[in-house]
Amino acid sequence: MGYWNTRGLRGSAFEEIINLTNEEYKKREVAIIQKIPTPITPVEFDKVHGQITLAYFDKRSTVDYIGVVQGLAICFDAKETMEKRLPLQNIHAHQVDFMQHFEKQGGIAFLLVHFAPADEYYYLPFAIMKKYWDDAQNGGRKSIPYSVFEEKFRLYPSDGYPLNYLEGINICLDEES
């Protein structure tokens, strides 16, 4: 069973940028996307500060976010790395399974990746992530190298959105048509 402690807040600044973007998407009626909370059971509680200091995860979560963009179902997970690669150990089998089933139902699954040292953000289509995941399961490399993250999928603030990740979806949809 997994345990949460103060390390559980890693990536919270990244998620806050995504949350602000989602609020702006909702406000402009472009999309409705929600953060999926990870269910926890508190074990220790700091009564003085009113904070949970130790908890365990009740069950495996699916992905970080799920929603609809103008009729298209989307789901994604946010991953942050301090390295010049995305370690596949940061992606869990149940997440890959969920995303695969989601796409089979006509949805769009992807990762948003933050390379913290360079402060760069990328959209990573599920198909690319899945290729590296499958290779790793068969003895291949255990990470996705930085070089795989294409400039066309680099994300920036634009049009008043803190991190306009819907641009990545648009690129993929344009390439499919």
Image (cartoon, grey):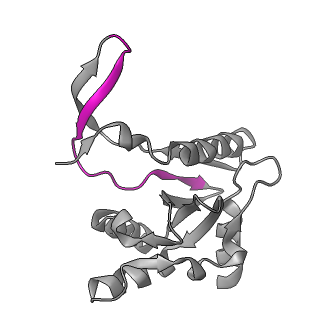
Q: Residue at x 67, y 61 (%)?
A: 166
Q: Which residue is nearer to you in this view: 36 or 147? A: 147
Q: Residue at x 75, y 48 (%)?
A: 161
Please indicate, yes or no, whether residue 177 appears anywhere in the rendered image. Answer: no
| Quarter of the view holding residue 13 | top right
Residue 39 higher or lower than 142, as above or below? above
Residue 37 higher or lower than 140, as above or below? above
Q: Residue at x 75, y 43 (%)?
A: 28
Classify the position of the C terminus by image quarter: bottom right
Q: Which residue is nearer to you in this view: 67 or 149? A: 149
Q: What are the residue bounds of the magenta stretch?
A: 48-68
Q: Residue at x 58, y 58 (%)?
A: 116
Q: Which residue is nearer to you in this view: 49 or 106? A: 49
Place of residue 104 in the rendered image (x, y in percent of width and height, measured from the top left): 41, 74
Place of residue 27 in the rendered image (x, y in percent of width and height, measured from the top left): 72, 38
Residue at the far right in the pictured view: 159
Residue 66 sits inside the magenta stretch: yes
| Quarter of the view holding residue 63 | bottom left
Place of residue 40 in the rendered image (x, y in percent of width and height, measured from the top left): 27, 36
Q: Which residue is nearer to you in this view: 171 or 20? A: 20
